[in-house]
Amino acid sequence: MRVRVAEQRRVRCAVMVQRSYRARLNRCRLVEITHVNSLRRRQCHDAASKLQRLYRSRAARAQTAVLRRAMEEHKAWKRHQVRVAVRLQSNWRRHAARRTIDAARVAHAERVAKRHAGATAVQRVGRGWLGRKKALVRRMQWMAQTAAAKRLQRWWRRCLAPRANTVAYQSLVAQIKLQLLGEAADAEAKTQAMLQKDRRKHDMDSASEADSEDDWYAYPGTNGQPWWFSPSRDQRQIVRPNCYAIAKSMVGLGVRVYWPFEATWFQGRIVKYCTSKRKHKIEYLDGDKEWSVLDDVEVGHLQLFNHECWLMYENYVASERATKAALYVNVRLQRYDVATFAWKTGKIRWFDDTSGLFCVAYDDASSGVDGSVGGDEMVDLLGCEDEFQLQDRRSFEWMGPGAYFFGPAYAATRVQDYMDYTGPYEEPMPNDVVDGGGGYGDDGNMWNNEGGEA
């Protein structure tokens, strides 16, 4: 029993020892395994860290190389962009500079042209003013010389006291002159009665185209400047008179006349003005013609076309240019043709105030620009006056448009001088009596005035 108990005790002790040993051994092995595992893990971690470090360094070197190449490419691209931008900027600056230079040249040319035009206008106005001033000085000198000559004539005639036989002889001569003047007056009265009868008969013919001009005659003065005298008006003017300017300005305008019996407006054109009868010639579109006194037409039955619109005859107002241009209407004209080296002659029919041109009917039917029948042509007489000459009705002398108004004795007169001329026009007649009759003035030409010096 005791042996068995001791055996069991020994076995339990052995088991306990073995268990303790094994526990100790297991704990040692566990520590060793744990240490080994920790070493292995540390080695693995170190190896992994080393691999990661190597990989990251390799990847970083590769990425750095890629970034370096990218930076080089970016720098190259930026350099290319800079070169392109510099080229574009240089091209644009060159283009802008050229545009600025061209604009400056154009502006300079415009300024020079405006300066030249202004200088030309100032010179033209200055020449006209100087010419008018010189003409006024000459006229004043001539009037002063005329007054002095008249005073000398009066003084000299008072010194010459007539004798008795001279008085008797002059009385006999005066009686004979009175008798001759009476006979001449009777003959003139009979002649005028016959002419008045023929004129009344002629005025009844509405289709008549007879025309006569005013009785203005040009006479040379002492200072070389001409003057105009009208016997019927007993007037004297220092420039050519522009008679019936308003009536002549209507020539060339369209016209519409209302006929009450037919209740219709008939349209036509005013083509001529007769100064002797104060009548306008109207050519209708249907081919009919008539001479009519426009002032006698009933109010509201006559319309005129002023190149812009139709208006009643009572509302027509001619412009200043049209009234002054009426001086050249119905005047003979000649124009030098460079193609044939000859002068083309014709007559001015009317003036177009809208375009500033004159309608000229040439004597040769083929002389017109378009070769139309009648040779009508619109010419710029006011702008190209050097190409034209006008003919005086009395002396048949050809002269420039400016000289036609002022007279050929004035030097270098232009149309613009006539357009700018505002007077004076009339010149007072001398009022000194010399023997109660007619005679010769100090200019060597004969004039008439009531109770004035001949």
Image (spheres, rainbow, N blue to C red):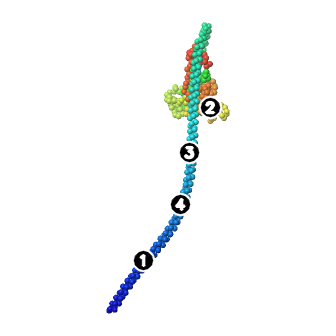
Q: Residue at x 61, y 27 (%)?
A: 411
Q: Which residue is mark 4?
A: 71
Give me the C-alpha separation between circle 4 and circle 3. Answer: 42 Å
Could you tell me which secondary element the residue under label 1 belongs to? helix
Name the residue type under label 4: Met
Name the residue type under label 2: Asp
Q: Which residue is mark 2?
A: 386
Circle nearer the viewer, 3 or 2: 3
Q: Earlier in the sequence, mark 4 or mark 3?
A: 4
Give me the C-alpha separation between circle 1 and circle 2. Answer: 132 Å
Q: Is residue 165 above or below residue 344?
A: above
Q: How many marks?
A: 4
Could you tell me which secondary element the residue under label 4 belongs to? helix
In this rendered view, identify the residue nearer to me: 215 or 303.
215
In this rendered view, identify the residue nearer to me: 263 or 116.
116
Name the residue type under label 3: Thr
Give me the C-alpha separation between circle 3 and circle 1. Answer: 92 Å
Within 10 angstroms of label 2, few (less than 14), some, or many (20 or more) residues? some
Could you tell me which secondary element the residue under label 2 belongs to? helix
Name the residue type under label 1: Thr
Give me the C-alpha separation between circle 3 and circle 2. Answer: 42 Å
Q: Position of residue 106 (x, y in %)?
A: 57, 42
Circle nearer the viewer, 1 or 2: 1
Q: Earlier in the sequence, mark 4 or mark 1?
A: 1
Circle nearer the viewer, 4 or 2: 4
Within 10 angstroms of label 1, few (less than 14), some, or many (20 or more) residues? few
Within 10 angstroms of label 4, few (less than 14), some, or many (20 or more) residues? few
Looking at the image, residue 7 sits to the left or right of residue 375; the answer is left
Q: Position of residue 360 (x, y in %)?
A: 60, 31
Q: Which residue is mark 1?
A: 34
